[in-house]
Amino acid sequence: MFETSLIWNDLWFMIQGAGTSLAITFWAVLGGTVLGIALGLARSVAPWWINAPLGAVLDVLRSVPLLIQFVLANSLKSIVGISWSPFLIACAVLALYTAAYCTEIVRGGILAVPKTTRRAARSLGMSYRQDMVEVVFPIALRVALPNWIGLTLGVMKDTSLVLWIGIIELLRSSQIVITRTQEPLLVLMIVGAFYFLMSFPIARLGARLEKRWREND
């Protein structure tokens, strides 16, 4: 007969950790997406002397492991004199990390619009703003959405790294429960189910939007 020392308080503790993971994901994706859209637009139209240094900074954010970024940011806050909580540090670092990838997603979506399409729009008398809003953005959104969904799901899983700066998110809460119950297999199966339940609605939303766009073509 199946027996476990897992109790409701353990499950509630992990649910609270899942809530922390979702909160960090929400603010990181929101901030990173807004910044990524702005930088993606800038990179698609800016001259090389702006594009080159901006691209170099984004390359650093994409290349340095996220764990190192968390630890450095959390350590440097006292040197700089910033009294941010670990939660704010986690959101800020993940937002910049998200923005670095989102910038290229947005830029790729904009550059995927054929030049002939844009020339046709301008030849019909559209202004630059109308061309961007009514022609470029709708096409770029369709191109960028699958990659953005993948980025969002990746950021959600990357929140597991914030345990290194003292935040009790889903994975860290499960480690604490494992220490008490000594049942790693059961606890990790539950954690995996939590991650699936958090990720599945986002993936389905993206698939639903893509299907609706195909039906409207």
Image (cartoon, rainbow, N blue to C red):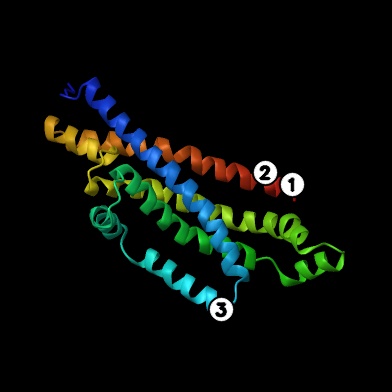
- Label 2–label 1 contact, CB within 8 A: yes
Specify few, some or many for label 1: CA neighbours under 10 Å numbering under 14, 14-19, or 20 or more.
Answer: few
Residue found at the far right of this picture? 124
Q: Give the residue displayed 74% in from the left and 60% down from the top.
A: 129
Question: 209 and 97: which one is in front?
Answer: 97
- Label 2–label 3 contact, CB within 8 A: no
Q: Give the residue displayed 27% in from the left and 26% down from the top.
A: 11
Q: CA distance from mark 2 to mark 3?
A: 38 Å
**Circle 3: residue type:** Trp
Left or right: where 131 falls relative to 165: right
Nearer to us: label 1 or label 3: 3
Q: Is residue 18 visible?
A: yes
User: Of marks 2 and 3, which one's residue comes earlier in the chain?
Assistant: 3
Quarter of the view holding residue 79: bottom left
The image shows residue 99 at horizontal and vertical percentages of 47, 57
Q: Tag on residue 212?
A: 2
The image shows residue 19 at horizontal and vertical percentages of 36, 33
Specify few, some or many for label 2: CA neighbours under 10 Å numbering under 14, 14-19, or 20 or more.
Answer: few
**Circle 1: residue type:** Asn
Quarter of the view holding residue 86: top left
**Circle 2: residue type:** Arg
Of helix, strand and loop, which one carries label 2? helix
Of helix, strand and loop, which one carries label 1? helix
The image shows residue 53 at horizontal and vertical percentages of 47, 74
The image shows residue 106 at horizontal and vertical percentages of 57, 60
Q: Tag on residue 48?
A: 3
Count of marks, rendered view: 3
Q: Tag on residue 216?
A: 1
Q: CA distance from mark 1 to mark 3?
A: 38 Å
Of helix, strand and loop, which one carries label 3? helix
